[in-house]
Amino acid sequence: MVIKSLARIVGILGSAIAVAGLGASAFATDVTAVRFGAHDTFSRVVIEADSPIEFDAFVLAEPNPRLVVSLPGAQWRVSGLDNGQGLGHGLFEDFRFDPSGLHPRLVFNLDGPSRINQEMVLDPTDGGYRMVIDINPSTQADFIEAAGFPERSQTLTQLLAEHAQIDALAGVCESPRIVVDAGHGGRDPGALTRFGGGHEADVNLAAARVLRELLEATGRFEVVMTRESDVFIDLEDRVRIARAAEADMFVSLHSDAAGSSSARGAAAYVLSSSGVNRSRTRARREGDWFLPDAANRPDEVNEILFDISMGDKLNRSYQFATELLSEARSVTPLLRERPEHRGFLVLLDAQFPAVLFEMGFLSNEQDSRNLNSDAHRRRLMASIVNALEDHFPSCGQSPGVQFAARTDGAAR
């Protein structure tokens, strides 16, 4: 189910621009040191500043475990770390200082699921004001439950996101629009078969046609194909097709190959953090924020909205990829039990969730025979349909996905 409705974000955007225009210098506090301690049962980070500062700490699960410390009005003044990056210790792998927006933040990559055990602020003794945060190892389940942004908005980005969600008006239920992308094609055959049957481009297209047939047979989905014959479609054009179609999910079908014939099994990929950075850098350089009506807004606001949209897209992509692998494991071996993060170009757009599904290895004899089998192909594509039906509940059921902040003044 897809709810299409309006959200009034004009007022909050105006306020955001006005507040951002104040600049951070009027409230600046210098961060002067970041220190770590590793103990038997917990790890500690101490953030030192030259004046009192409020902070907010929380953990995030996707695309990788990390601790985020929001530091309103902070500036980076750590000697020897002019680039704002450094190595951690204990449960802290490394960190970086992100000065963007009204609320700069320190982001710590963690070596696994963790929870915040203690936060405190210590007054100066022989140094600056100290913010102390202790974290403990956690189970994956507890980590996922605790992860997420604070309930009250502590950053401009979250304020915008919450406003778009809370102000959503009741909408109409429409059929989810699925863009099915058959990888490769034309002058790009993709992976070559070793055991007879079609090359990757042919296998992908055959699977895409079956997936379209099965999706349309449910009566619940609209389907758009990026290609319907053996033609070459540029990767960026595939993204443009999905964007123009206002995709609710982008599914790119591929077949893998490896140097060893023993490698086999299906895998699902979603966008990586490096891919997000690549997308953001490109958007800054080219002025294309992958967002509707971006030309009519300042880049600062576009970047905020880009981050909102991308965060929502990553969460929904990972959720669907997990559902897909759960369904596919009954049909084919899995190369990996969980979705992997990659920077594939067809996954970069911020407007819609996207998953690249490697259906198996043409370099493996059994996988190759399966991928060229009509019966196996239908079973495998049926697993995608099942996952999509789980991901998009029917009209009248509770939606599995919350409203996403839309940047054209609407929430979906």
Image (cartoon, rainbow, N blue to C red):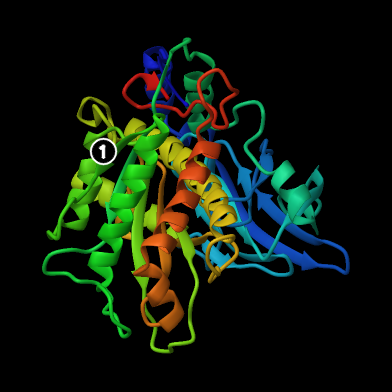
Q: Position of residue 187 (x, y in %)?
A: 11, 69
Outermost residue, front direction?
A: 375
Out of 129 and 175, give the one closest to the viewer.
Answer: 175
Compared across the picture, whether 154 is left or right of 47 comes to left
Residue found 50% across the figure and 33% down from its top: 392
Q: How many numbered discs, if any?
A: 1
Q: Quadrant of the C terminus?
A: top left
- Is residue 329 visible in the rendered image? The answer is yes
Answer left or right for 228 relative to 406: left
Q: Nearer the viewer, residue 108 or 379?
A: 379
Please provide percent x and percent y for residue 98.
Answer: 49, 49
Q: Residue furthest top?
A: 170
Which residue, given by chain and number where applicable, does mark 1 sit on?
A: 243
Image-quadrant location for residue 363: bottom left
- Counting from the top left corner in percent of width and height, residue 99 is at 47, 46
Q: What is the residue that sits farthest to the right in this orientation? A: 40
How far from the left and from the top, in percent, is residue 258? 39, 83
What residue sits 42% from the left and 34% below the top?
218
Q: Residue at x 65, y 48 (%)?
A: 49
* Viewer-proximal residue among 278 and 34: 278
Residue 386 falls left or right of residue 130: left
Does residue 289 appear anywhere in the picture?
A: no
Q: Taking 12 as reference, is 375 above or below it?
A: below
* Quadrant of res 72: top right
Q: Residue 6, located in which quarter of the rendered image? A: top left
Residue sitting nearer the eye, 68 or 382: 382
Residue at the image point whose x is 45% and y is 59% from the top: 269
Amino acid type at circle 1 is Arg
Q: Which secondary structure lies at badge 1?
A: helix
Within 10 Å of disc 1 (Cα), the crowding (few <14, some 14-19, many 20+) is many
Position of residue 117 relative to residue 403, above or below, is below
